[in-house]
Image (cartoon, grey):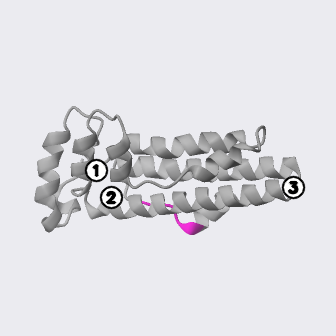
Amino acid sequence: MVSESDIPPDEFAAFQEFVARVDGTNISAQTLLATDYLNHFNEIVMLIDMIPDMPDMVEECKMWQPKSYTEHFADSSFKDKQLAIEAYDRVPSKFRRPFEETLNQLNGLIIGGVNKLEEEILAGSDPGLITEHVKAISRAAQALMDCANAIIHGSDRAMAQLEIDGVLNGM
């Protein structure tokens, strides 16, 4: 559990107020974050995974756009979406910074990966190479989603770029 010594004093009172409000919801009382946000990324990774069998799926993948945490919940049917939106401003910086850093890495990976796959498809690249690149993108995205999930549940560590590059090795 997060203690007062873990959070700067100027953030602690607002955090504590919301800890009580999220009790009994799918919002973590440890961080005030909800795993439901990761569905935004799960959906695009599933579409990317279809590209080797259906190369035209890259067009649908290109329509995907990053959504902020609050945009996702504003558009969702999540039962406690308004509470998730309000709580986000009270997420301690200890968690919010690595969470947002991880999301930026994930958004960049997905957009860059889809663009690369589109170029390879249009260039008539070897289907086996495209399949390998899809696997690398999916592995890296899953590693980043796992990192984001860990942060949601109380970790305060984002992945280093070197770790991401290691997962992407072979692309």
**1 left or right of 112?**
left
Q: Which mark is residue 95?
A: 2
Q: Position of residue 111 (x, y in %)?
A: 60, 59
What range of the chain is rendered magenta? 157-161
Whether residue 8 is visible, yes or no, is yes
Tell me which corner region of the image, top left, top right, bottom left or bottom right, holds residue 53: top right
Q: Quick one: label 1, few (<14), some, or many (20+) residues within 10 Å?
A: many
Q: Is residue 129 above or below residue 93?
A: above
Q: Nearer the viewer, residue 19 or 56?
A: 56
Question: Mark 3 is on which residue type?
Answer: Ser
Q: Position of residue 136 (x, y in %)?
A: 70, 52
Magenta region, main secondary structure: loop
- Label whose residue precedes the other's in the sequence (3 or 1): 1
- Label whose residue precedes the other's in the sequence (2 or 3): 2
Q: Position of residue 64 (x, y in %)?
A: 55, 50
- Identity of the residue drawn at 59% across and 62% down: 163
Q: Secondary structure at mark 1?
A: loop
Q: Is residue 47 above or below residue 13?
A: above
Q: Which residue is mark 1?
A: 31
Whether residue 171 is visible, yes or no, is no
